[in-house]
Amino acid sequence: MFSDRRRFFPLLVFLAVPVALTAQNTVRGGGCSEVPREDALPSLCAPPTSETTAPSVPDSVILLQVPAGTALRVAIDQKVRIAAVGQVVSGKITESVYAFDQPVIPAGSEVTGKVTSIHGVPGKRKVMSYVNGNFSPYHEYELEFDSVTLPNQERRAIATTVSPGIAQVVHLVPGGAKKQPNAAQRQIESAKAGAKAKVNDTLDEIKSPGKMQRLKELALAQSPYRRQYLQPGTRFYAALDEPLDFGKTTRTAEQLAQLGKSPEPDSILHARFAEEVSSATAHRGNVIAAVLTEPLFSQDHHLLLPANSRIAGEVIKAQPARKLHHNGDLRVIFNRVETPEGVVQPMQGSVEGVEADRRSGVRLDDEGGAQATDSKTRYLSTGVAVLLAAAASHTDNEHGTTDAAGDPGVRAGAGVSGSGITGTLISLAAKSQPVSMAFAAYGAGTSVYNNFLSRGKDVVFVKNTPLEIGFSEPHQKAAEKKP
């Protein structure tokens, strides 16, 4: 009997151990799937206090997307004749395009496109062109850029709407280039030194016409027949019709700790006009908007404002151009900036720099207001035209003889004044004083009207015009206003 009990004892021990362990877990762990540490509280299924750590904040996932409407600033790098639809056009990106806080389309990236349409010349403009001795007036045309190749040779398809080209781009600053730069302008030079070096390298690769080439083109411009070319260095603003996705990245909480905070006074915001602003149509109080094209960082390199933040402002003065050649005047201010996440900062900003067409004659005054101006050469050109008209009305008396046709040099000058080289050829061939007088009178009258009697020029900043905005803290009353 005793031997039988010894035989079943191991089996009883084997069955009893799991039951004992389950009971211990029920008392100590309250349903834990594993035995707690020795120093854990009986009511908690948790590791010992000595081994617990504070939960870490996960990194933020940032989508690197370039929204539709973002403008690519493109400079043409090869001379192209505007002759047929479908002609290939190529250029380079002159300013990096940012998504959130990093460049995704660096300056120097190559873009390609084509001529999509060439418009006919309106009848009135064609007649005036013929009268002025130009029998091949230039056609309006449209382009589109459909691909961009990044420096790593990645090629991306794009769809764009392209603005009219600007052949001679100038960067305007308050008070003109000869004025001693203020603190904001000095910061522009300091903050953009590295970026400008890249842009200058890009533009150096694009050879604009030299002095001799420009003189040659000026002479050809007087020809009755001339070809239409798209010159290297011509700038375009190509707005994306569809967004571009460049994946995603992450940023730590420490990197985003100052996101949305107010920038330092005299900080410079690099932006573009979201819509066209013109002295011809704007009125005092009109709301305007700009879009931040480059992220703004603090002095310790923390992100304050990401790219594509919105900057709101208003027109405080708008004087349209008037007759008797009175030019337009436009002044705007900016009063708040809003990040894509909805953080709003009041501000008091003014224009500290803007890109413009040299032919527009626009300049910025000391406070950032824009006025259209005229070249002083208009007085000289008009005076010469009037003198030629007076000289053409006198006969040529030399060596006791009278030439009824007038002096040949005067006839040639009268023809140029009226209709360029075509007028000169006609005037010399006709050998008629009345013909020379007609050309000279037309030239003098046209010069006087265009330079002194016609309507002046308006200040126009087309959509996507790049500008720099000086940031400063608003006055107390302005800061208390709700956006």
Image (cartoon, helix red, strand yellow):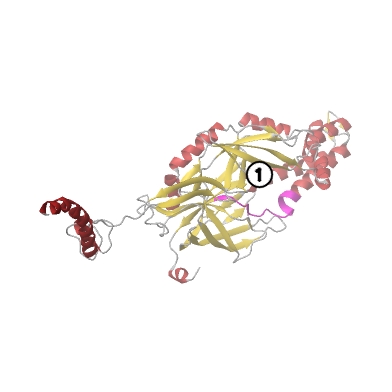
> Which residues are drawn in magenta?
449-466
Q: Can residue 437 be seen in this snapshot?
A: yes
Direction left: furthest residue: 2
Picture quadrant where residue 141 is located: top right
Q: Quadrant of the N terminus?
A: bottom left
Direction front: furthest residue: 1
Q: Secondary structure at mark 1?
A: helix
Q: Which residue is mark 1?
A: 377
Residue closest to the eye, 21 or 96: 21
Residue at 74 percent across and 41 percent down: it is 117
Residue 217 x, y percent position in the rendering: 69, 32
Residue 458 horizontal side relative to residue 63, left or right:
right
Residue 200 x, y percent position in the rendering: 51, 37
Residue 91 horizontal side relative to residue 410, left or right:
left
Residue closest to the eye, 54 or 221: 54
Residue 220 x, y percent position in the rendering: 73, 32
Residue at 20 percent across and 59 percent down: it is 20
Residue closest to the eye, 153 or 180: 153
Q: Is residue 459 magenta?
A: yes
Q: Is residue 157 magenta?
A: no
Residue 379 horizontal side relative to residue 395, left or right:
left
